[in-house]
Structures are given as C-alpha cells and as structure tokens.
Image (cartoon, rainbow, N blue to C red):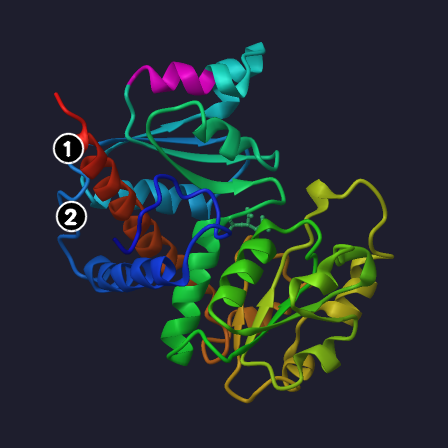
C-alpha cells in the first residue's frame, strides 16, 4: 500500500513515498484536464461536500471541478448562509452533514486544528483545504508538482519562501513537504513575520532578500495575511515592498533559471511586482492553479480507493 491515509489533514504524517504516489497520479490528470471530454467515473456514486468557512477562490473552485470531473456528486455549502450563523457549532454542523452520508468532506476553517477535530467526528474521508495557520496540504502538493515539472526533481533544490511566514499555513505545509523530499529551505522575511521557533525546523532564516535569494532554484512569495495580524507587524506596505517585495532586481540574485511562485491571492506592489508575476518566462503562478485541479483529483481518488477498500473489508 503506497497511500494508506484515511484523511488528508496535513503533510506532517505523509511518507515521502505517499507524496510521490500522489504526485505521479496527479501527473496523469494534467494531460486529462488539458484534453476535451474531461470526465471520468472514478468517483461515481460518491458524494463530496465542500464546507468553506473562510473565503476562497482557487481552492474551492478547484476542489469542485476536481470532484465533478471525476464524476462525484458535488455540493458546495454556502457557509455564510448556514446555521453556523445561528449559533450551531462546527461539530454539530459536521454531524448533521455526516448523517446525510457524504463520502468526501472538504473543509477550510479559520482555526488551526478545527479540521482535525472534525475528522474525528465523521465517518467519511476529510480533506483539509486550509486550517488557520496550521496546514494546507493540497497547496503544498500542487506547489511540489509545479516545482517537479519545472525542475525535474524535488530533492537537492534551494527553495526560498519569502514574506509572512508566521501567519502562513502554505509556508508550514511547504516546509514540511520540501523537508521530507530533501530540499534546502530558506525563509526570508522581517523578524516580526518569522515564527519564534523557525530556526529549529532545519531551515535557514534571512532578513535580507538579496542574501536569502542568492543561488535559489525556486522563489516562493507569500501574501501579507493582514486578516491574521492583530498589530503592526510591518512599518508600512511601501517600506515592506521596498525591502521584501520581489522585483527583477532582487530576483537577479537567484539562479538564472529560478522560478517564481505565489499561492494567490496576490497583492501586486506589496509582496510582488505585477510585471514579474505576469512574466511567463519566470512566473509559474498560473501553472500552480492548473496543478491544483490535478492534485485535488489525485488526492480524492486515493482517499476514495481507501474508503472503498475499507467498506469492502467490513463483513455484511
Ligand atoms: C492561501 C490560503 O488560503 O491559505 N491561498 C490559497 O489557498 N491559494 C494563501 C493566502 O490566503 O494568502
């Protein structure tokens, strides 16, 4: 068994072989998604419910498309209009939906750990679409697929993750994944946006972009997560852009063939220069979005296989 997990809650508990299995399967879906007639029955008969308690464009759309292309019955709940607004707890909402026998539950929640808690209460497979500042596993997997396609490998690369590391579940899941795949990770940002224990994670930490980008193969920019900040972490956006915003001049310190990534949504002129973000010779930002659908299809297929295997193993 190369992918034995029941849920996809984070990168933390995945084995490198499971990561490779998932990426290899996702690779087959890249071609599938580019061809006309993109429909299969891999998830036929299964019900997928998407519950997004936080805003999302890319993640929600791609989970929905992924499920539909694989033939699942997909329902996206509008959490703004749900009974959560009437005071129902997360767990009560989950138990209510669980009683309708979904097979796959895709959840995004503003609190770290909320998705893990929910997974303990339901019978179906749960996919974490981002919980607080904890994990965002499918984002790290789609980033890994994008890097692997551009660089041909995931090991022995120098990956610079820049910006608001402290509030970023994307950074956390990427650090875990790239560490497992034996890449070298550098975190670059103002000290106020680097988590206290970061130096114990087996990464290098820089507060100077030019020094941190020197010789990097991959430059991953992060959004300033203002909604998670409760005070003045940066003097001003203008000053931040000056010191930490990626532009062509700073990128010149990385390798000549370094790729530029951003999980989106982007704040042009805050963490990245708009022209650079659109430069198809350097930026793989749109490819990340494309890989997102393929990775989510692969994740749901693998979890569905395990779901079916377990159902088959239970005596009637
Ligand atoms: C990220 C998220 O929501 O964690 N976006 C995404 O899923 N592509 C990053 C962010 O919000 O900045």
With 116 as the anchor, is 151 left or right in this view?
left
The residue sitting at 66% across, 66% down in the picture is: 162
Among the 4 quarters of the image, the one containing residue 161: bottom right
Q: Residues within 10 Å of mark 1 (few under 14, many from 20)?
A: few
Q: Is mark 1 on a helix, strand or loop?
A: helix
| Comparing labels 2 and 1, the label whose residue is closer to the camera | 1
Which residue lies under the disc numbered 1? 312
In what element is the residue under mark 2?
loop
Residue drawn at (15%, 57%), measured in percent from left and top? 36
Q: Is residue 65 or residue 164 the one in the foreground? A: 164
| Distance between mark 2 and mark 1 Cα atoms | 25 Å
The spot of residue 200 in percent (x, y) is: 71, 62
Quadrant of the frame with the C terminus: top left
Vertical placement of residue 140 versus 102, above or below:
below
Q: Is 130 above or below relative to 251?
A: above
Badge 2 or badge 1: first in the primary sequence: 2
Q: Give the range drawn in magenta.
A: 93-100
The image shows residue 113 at horizontal and vertical percentages of 58, 35
User: Residue at label 2?
Assistant: 39
Q: Are marks 2 and 1 in contact (CB under 8 Å)?
A: no
Give the image quarter of residue 234.
bottom right
Question: Is residue 274 inside the magenta stretch?
Answer: no
Is residue 137 visible in this depiction of the protein?
yes
Q: Check the image and report above or below for 283 versus 311.
A: below
**Of residues 62 and 247, which is closer to you in this image?**
62
Neighbour class for label 2 at 10 Å: few (<14), some, many (≥20)? some
Closer to the camera, 33 or 296?
296
Query: How far from the left and from the top, in percent, is residue 281?
Result: 46, 80
Mark 2 vs ligand 1: CB under 8 Å? no
Q: Is residue 72 left or right of residue 204?
A: left
């Amino acid at each position: 068994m190369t992918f034995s997990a029941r849920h996809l809650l984070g990168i933390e508990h995945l084995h490198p072989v499971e990561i490779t299995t998932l990426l290899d399967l996702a690779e087959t879906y890249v071609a599938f998604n580019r061809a006309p007639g993109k429909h299969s029955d891999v998830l036929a008969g299964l019900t997928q419910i998407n519950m997004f308690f936080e805003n999302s464009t890319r993640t929600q759309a791609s989970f929905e498309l992924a499920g539909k292309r694989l033939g699942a019955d997909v329902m996206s709940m509008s959490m703004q209009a749900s009974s959560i607004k009437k005071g129902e707890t997360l767990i009560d909402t989950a138990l209510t939906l669980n009683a309708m026998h979904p097979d796959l539950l895709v959840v995004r929640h503003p609190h770290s750990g909320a998705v893990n808690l929910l997974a303990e209460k339901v019978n179906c497979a749960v996919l974490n679409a981002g919980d607080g500042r904890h994990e965002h596993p499918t984002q790290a997997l789609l980033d890994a697929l994008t890097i692997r396609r551009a660089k041909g490998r995931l090991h022995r690369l120098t990956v610079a993750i820049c910006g608001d590391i402290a509030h970023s579940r994307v950074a956390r899941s990427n650090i875990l994944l790239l560490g497992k795949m034996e890449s070298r990770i550098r975190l670059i940002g103002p000290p106020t946006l680097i988590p206290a224990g970061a130096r114990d994670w087996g990464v290098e930490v820089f507060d100077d972009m030019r020094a941190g980008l020197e010789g990097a193969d991959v430059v991953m920019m992060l959004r300033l997560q203002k909604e998670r900040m409760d005070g003045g972490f940066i003097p001003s956006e203008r000053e931040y852009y000056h010191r930490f915003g990626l532009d062509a001049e700073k990128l010149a310190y990385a390798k000549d063939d370094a790729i530029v990534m951003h999980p989106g949504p982007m704040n042009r002129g805050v963490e990245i220069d708009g022209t650079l973000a659109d430069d198809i010779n350097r930026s793989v930002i749109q490819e990340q979005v494309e890989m997102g659908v393929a990775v989510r299809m692969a994740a749901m297929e693998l979890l569905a296989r395990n779901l079916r295997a377990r159902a088959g193993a239970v005596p009637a």
